[in-house]
Each structure stands twice: as C-alpha cells, then as structure tokens.
Image: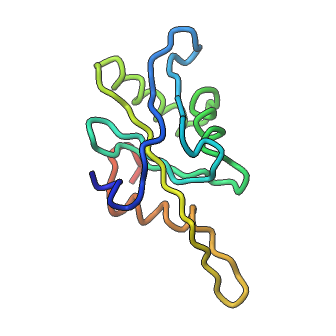
Amino acid sequence: MKLQNYGFIRCGECTLDKKLKQGVRFKIWKLKNRRVIYAFVVDGKPKYIGACEAINTTLANRMGNYRSNPERTNKKVRSRVKECLKNGQAVEIFAWQCDCQFKYRGLSCDDVMGFEGPFIRKLNPEWNDR
C-alpha cells in the first residue's frame, strides 16, 4: 500500500453504531494523542487525507469532530464513511507523524500542514476536494 511506503501506520477503524446520533464510531488505538496527518482507507485505497490543523488538535480530537461537528467537510466525509460501512466495506484509519523539525533562519515550519498538500497531490484520494 502506498501510504505505508510513506510511513503511515494503521491506527484505527470506523464502525457503524446505532447508539450514536450520526451512526459512525471512529475507533483509534494508536497515535490518538498525537498531531498527525491521517487517511481514511477503503479496500486498501486512501479515500481521504486530512490533518490535525491546529497545533493542539490530536487525532482523537479530530475524529471526534467527524462524529459531532456539523462543518461541511466533516459531514461529507462522515456520510461517505457511513455509506461504505453500510455496503460492507471496511474503513480503516491510518496516520503519519513526522519526527523531524524544519527551520529556516529562525522560523519553524509546520510539518503537519506542510506535508498534507503533497500527500493529497501524490495519492489523489477521491474524497478530497480538488
């Protein structure tokens, strides 16, 4: 899988849960308290790549937003995840964390935001807006 070639690891999965208002549970078992770039993967293919944008947002926080935040992207991705699950497809969550720090003349570069775009361009996931 291409994601693993870039250092992404499987860290969770999505499941249907009728007890939840939105019907989808985002289970995370690795990197949950880390700021990462993440991907929703269906049938071995990355369908969506996103980032924990704010400096203090963790993967667990970001997945919580998919469950409860009504913002357009959250609703769109959540509905696609739910549709896949209803069709019997597994939806896995992968994440990538950079352990490097980039500095230029005293300025620090945000690796999470800096790599999100290149991953999207390289992997071309169909759920990301073009």
Choose between 121 and 44: the one closer to the eye: 44
Q: In the image, residue 81 lies at what x, y percent? A: 41, 29
Q: In the image, residue 94 lies at what x, y percent? A: 44, 45
Residue extending furthest top? Answer: 19
Residue extending furthest front? Answer: 30
Query: What residue is drawn where x is 46% and y is 35%?
Result: 77
Position of 82 with respect to 66 (left or right) is left
Query: What residue is drawn where x is 43% and y is 49%?
Result: 9
Query: What residue is drawn where x is 44% and y is 22%?
Result: 15
> Could you tell me how many numbered marks the image carries?
0
Residue extending furthest bottom? Answer: 105
Query: What residue is drawn where x is 59% and y is 14%?
Result: 21
Q: How is the image coloured?
A: rainbow
Position of 16 with respect to 42 (left or right) is right
Position of 39 with respect to 72 (left or right) is left
Relative to 35, say whether 108 is above or below: below
Q: In the image, residue 34 lies at what x, y percent? A: 63, 50
Choose between 4 and 22: the one closer to the eye: 4
Q: Where does the C terminus fall, quadrant-wise?
A: bottom left
Q: Quadrant of residue 90?
A: top left
Relative to 90, say whether 109 is above or below: below
Position of 45 with respect to 117 (left or right) is left
Q: In the image, residue 85 lies at what x, y percent? A: 36, 22
